[in-house]
Amino acid sequence: MPDAVVIGAGPNGLVAANLLADAGWSVEVLEEQPEPGGAVRHDQGVDPAFVNDLFSSFYPLAAASPVLAGLRLQDHGLRWSHAPSVLAHPLTDGSCAVLDRDLDATAASLDAFDPADGDAWRRLHEVWEGLRPDLLDALFTPFPPVRATARLALKLRAAGGLRMARSLVLPVRRLGEEEFRGHGGRLLLAGNALHADLAPESSGSGGFGWLMAMLGQTYGFPVPAGGSGALTSALVRRLESRGGRVRCGQRVTRVVVRGGRAVGVRTAAGDAVRARRAVLADVSVPALYGELVEPEHLPAQLLEDLRRFQWDFATFKVDWALDGPVPWQAEQASRAGTVHLSDGMDELTRFAAQIAMRQVPDRPFTIFGQMTTSDATRSPQGTESAWAYTHIPHDIRSDAGDEGITGDWSAKDQELFADRVERQVERFAPGFRDLVRARRVLAPPTLEAMDGNLTGGAINGGTTAMHQQLVFRPLPGTGRPETPVPGLFLASSGAHPGGGVHGAPGSNAARAALRRNLPPGLAGAQRLLARRDRTGTRR
């Protein structure tokens, strides 16, 4: 019998398993799919000569994460690779905003839109550099991050106090208007906000867009050399080197609760897997509380709040094998790993409004990945392994275009919308479609079938909007990994701090499980130290 059973071999589940193994626990990870990784996997399914990431590709949060840094995955084969530039946002007039790890290069790009905007970017970066250590500490530690928040409050005061806090909760459209005279800086912030489900007019989208842009400025948007699954492989190798075990093709159907405590799980095959100390669930919040745990073990208020849980936008993705580099009209885009495709702020707002009205967007904002530009091992020399994804509503009422896409995601729907995504790319890269050797369409039902956590194609474990963050994530009053069932811990992106490949939810869950299983004397000392941390008493 293992000390812990981890449900799900996504990055958070594997991080949790590694930390428990480091503490001397025996750990067994059960994964439904035939291979580990969750949304961090690659294959050669588009063309045998091309490596395509199935889900996530670029990892600024992984590069910034102290959780992953502490695992020293480079000792287990992980190597990061970068494109020459981080991100580009071209416009159809040929202009292009560029985010580069070289601050001077980013500033020069924005000066092309307005001579004052390079210095405006430098000011935002200066604030970031002052806040970065404590902001990242607050982001990647359990909620509430008392010590990090106290330090951050002092730094915020030095950076302008309430004025800075106001800037971080602004809609990204307003933040961009206040900080920049030209369109370039505004688009870098707004496009990054839409990596999640934050529209230009959403409260807090300014802070999220600024955070993602500054992560790119400092850490880049790196990719694992050889494919995204290289990150998963490093996590699995590290776990196995410490005696942990990953079993694939094992779908968990029930968390077993006895005497008011989680004591193991049951699989679809009818097997019971006991856990001596803890069960950690790297699964979506609705799956955990709506399927895996029987209702009688949960508070009525939690089940009521579960009805109000909100998913992030659905996702539609297209993978390509291209016979040559993308022929961008704006040459600067050819050096960027990630390219944002929308012809200005108003088009971003229009896109988000169509989703809000439950329409299939007619000009979808597209996040485009140039993987061979980022990692030369991904395809033969002179070619490009590429992908694009865009957001769509979960419940589709109509098509904002004129093709009658219904949202049932039949083969016809998939091909029509994939063609629409290609036409969006073609607006900024005339001749793109002539380069397509092969393509693969991953509609929302396909994404969910390949990873059960991606319900309806939602990739962030729930909305990033302010009403479902911090103490409200995943449900009001449940901001920590502990659940109402003793011995059961939430270790997925549904928990604080949310989506992205950084390992924090898995780390937080593992540390919570370890705290709850300390010997009595050590547990008392741990509680005393925690009280001192909360009251600010010096240790």
Image (tube, grey):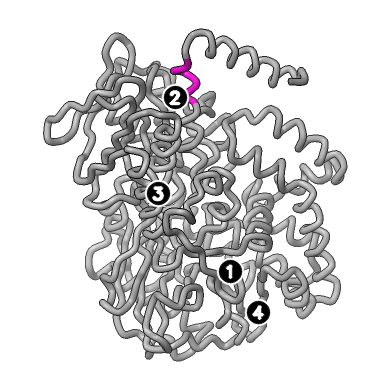
* Circle nearer the N terminus (3, 1): 3
Residue extent of the magenta highlight = 512-518
Q: Position of residue 228 (x, y in %)?
A: 40, 61
Instruction: Name the quarter where the C terminus is drawn.
Output: top right
Q: Which residue is mark 3?
A: 235
* Circle nearer the N terminus (2, 3): 3
Closest to the camera, between mark 3 and mark 1, is 3
* Circle nearer the N terminus (4, 1): 4
Closest to the camera, between mark 4 and mark 3, is 3
Q: Is residue 510 above or below residue 435?
A: above
The three-letter code of the residue at mark 4 reads: Cys
- Residue ID at (37%, 65%): 53
| Residues packed near mark 3 inside 10 Å, few (<14), some (14 to 19) or many (20 plus) | many
The three-letter code of the residue at mark 2 reads: Ala
* Circle nearer the N terminus (2, 4): 4
Disc 3 and disc 1 in contact, CB within 8 angstroms: no
Please give left or right for residue 74 compared with residue 161 in the image: left
Residue 513: give its label: 2
Q: Position of residue 524 (x, y in %)?
A: 56, 9
Q: Could you give the CA–CA distance between mark 2 and mark 1, rounded to whole angstroms?
A: 46 Å
Please give left or right for residue 33 compared with residue 86 in the image: left
Closest to the camera, between mark 2 and mark 4, is 2
* Circle nearer the N terminus (2, 1): 1
* Circle nearer the N terminus (4, 3): 4
